[in-house]
Image (cartoon, helix red, strand yellow):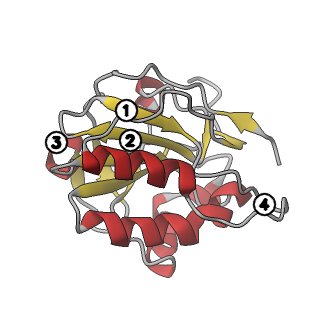
Amino acid sequence: MARTESKMLALGTVAPEFSLLDSVSKKTMNLHSLNGSKGTVIMFICNHCPFVVHVNPEITKMALEYQKQGIHFIAISSNDVEKYPEDDPQFMRIKAKAENYTFPYLYDEDQSVAKKYDAACTPDFYLFDEGLKLVYRGQLDDSRPGNGLSLTGKDLRSAIENLLKGEEINPVQKPSIGCNIKWKSNA
C-alpha cells in the first residue's frame, strides 16, 4: 500500500462548490445543501484503501456524535473506477450501508472536485467553519493500519471541538497519510 501525504490546502480557503451523485440516494447533491450550521467535514475516501478501512469505525462514530451539534460530514470518492472497479458507485452504496454511514457518500466521476480541493490521498480530511472557510486539514489521528496506536480521531476531534467552542484551532496540523487517489490517465 502506497503511503501518500495530503497536500495541506491553505487554511482560510473557501470550500469549492460541487454537485455530485450520492451513491446511496442516487440523487445529485451540492455543497450548499449539505453544509452544516456550525461546520462541515469533507472527507476524500474510497472503498478499498486499507487506511480508509482502518478509520471507518471512527469516522462513523464521529459523524453520529457531531451531526447533532451542527457539524455535517460529507464523503467523496474520486478514484478511477475503470482501474479500481471496487470503488464504483454501486459498491460505494453497499459500503455506505455496511459501515452505517449517516452522511452522503458522493462520487466524483471526473475527479474535478478532488483537484479543486487539492486532495491527494484517502483518507484526506478537511474541516470548514460555518462560512465554509478551511480551519483544519490533515490527519484523523496518529493511528495507521498495523502501527498499534488506538484509533481516537484526536486531531480532527480537537479541531471540531475548538470550532464548536469558538476557540482558536492550532494551525500546526499533520498531513493525513493514506493511499494515493487513483487518477485517470487522462486526468
Does the CB distance between marks 4 and 1 fall below 8 Å?
Answer: no
Spatial CA distance of label 2 from label 1 is 6 Å
Residue 102 visible in image: no
Front residue of 107 and 81: 107
* x, y percent for residue 113: 40, 32
Does the CB distance between marks 2 and 1 fall below 8 Å?
Answer: yes
Q: Is residue 58 left or right of residue 150?
A: left
Q: Secondary structure at mark 2?
A: strand
* x, y percent for residue 93: 44, 69
Front residue of 105 and 27: 105
Spatial CA distance of label 3 from label 2 is 15 Å
Q: Inspect the image, locate mark 3, and give the three-letter code of the amino acid beneath it.
A: His
Q: Mark 4 vs mark 1: which is more N-terminal? A: 1
Q: Which mark is residue 127?
A: 2
Foreground disc of the pair 4, 1: 1
Give the residue number, with chain letter if any, for mark 4: 145
Quadrant including the C terminus: top right
Q: Inspect the image, locate mark 2, and give the three-letter code of the amino acid beneath it.
A: Leu
* x, y percent for residue 40: 30, 47
Residue 7 vertical position relative to residue 167 in the rendered view, above or below: above
